[in-house]
Amino acid sequence: MKGALTPRDAADMIADGASLMIAGFMGVGSPHRLIDALVARNARELTVIANDTARPGFGIGKLISAGAVRHVITSHIGLNPETQAGMIEGSITVELVPQGTLVERIRAGGMGLGGVLTPTGLGTEVEEGKRIIEVEGNHFLLETPLRADFSLLAAGQADYVGNLAYSLTAHNFNPVMALAADTVIAEAESIVPVGVIPPDAVKTPSVLVDHLLLRAC
């Protein structure tokens, strides 16, 4: 099976201070066993790029609760009071990015683009320190690409060579994050022989996946 790892092996690959893209929305579509392994390893000083930080004790919230995260780039933290408290006290730095802008910055990083032009955030705190570009009389913020050392994905199904299929809202960030990291590690609810996943259902092809997490015995 392609690049098979145990959760502990995967956590050991991820050094303290690494940048991680972690998929999911409020923990749905997040790689929970990978997150648990990072907490068990006592990971520290991580940068997490994610849609949100879930809630205390669940999903990415486990990393927040464990003190593993130094910096977060995310769309919202409103449902995790621990992230809010960390930001206020200065133990966590938080860059809040509008959700559509966040996913487009990740896509730009994956596609090798120089950035994204968007009107979202003009005239607000979002524009502070950013370039404003005029195109045919209209103004846009230049939002820079995002990439990470690792993308940690959660799939509904994987096959033995690493093709991935997702369920429902897990489609939101998993496929685009698979494009934008140096190393991609995926955990799946089930791992099946090649051919079981219909070609049209493959959203992340195996060429993008470096490692698959072994299923628990």
Image: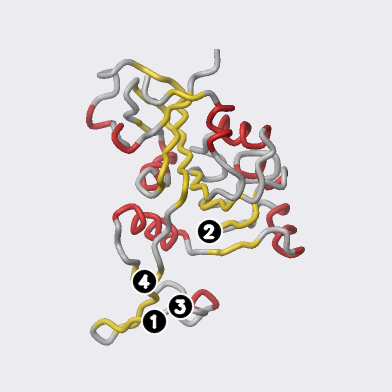
Distance between mark 2 and mark 1 Cα atoms: 21 Å
Distance between mark 4 and mark 3 Cα atoms: 12 Å
Whether pointer 2 and pointer 1 mark residues with C-beta atoms closer than 8 Å, the reply is no
Residue that badge 4 annotates = 118
Residue that badge 3 annotates = 130
**N-term mark: 2 or 3:** 2
Q: Which mark is residue 57?
A: none
Whether pointer 4 and pointer 3 mark residues with C-beta atoms closer than 8 Å, the reply is no
Secondary structure under tag 4 reads: strand
Distance between mark 3 and mark 1 Cα atoms: 6 Å
Whether pointer 2 and pointer 4 mark residues with C-beta atoms closer than 8 Å, the reply is no
Q: Position of residue 93 (x, y in %)?
A: 64, 62
Distance between mark 2 and mark 3 Cα atoms: 18 Å
Residue that badge 1 annotates = 132
**N-term mark: 2 or 1:** 2
Foreground of the two, 43 or 133: 43
Number of other residues with Cα within 10 Å of mark 4, as a class: few under 14, some 14 to 19, many 20 or more: some
| Residue type beneath disc 2 | Ser
Q: Position of residue 204 (x, y in %)?
A: 32, 37
Distance between mark 1 and mark 4 Cα atoms: 10 Å
Residue at x 55% of width, y 77% of height = 125
Q: Position of residue 78 (x, y in %)?
A: 64, 57
Residue at x 48% of width, y 21% of height = 214
> Quadrant location of the N terminus?
top left
**N-term mark: 4 or 3:** 4
Number of other residues with Cα within 10 Å of mark 2, as a class: few under 14, some 14 to 19, many 20 or more: many
| Residue type beneath disc 4 | Thr
Number of other residues with Cα within 10 Å of mark 1, as a class: few under 14, some 14 to 19, many 20 or more: some
**N-term mark: 1 or 4:** 4
Is 210 rendered above or below residue 180? above
Distance between mark 2 and mark 4 Cα atoms: 16 Å
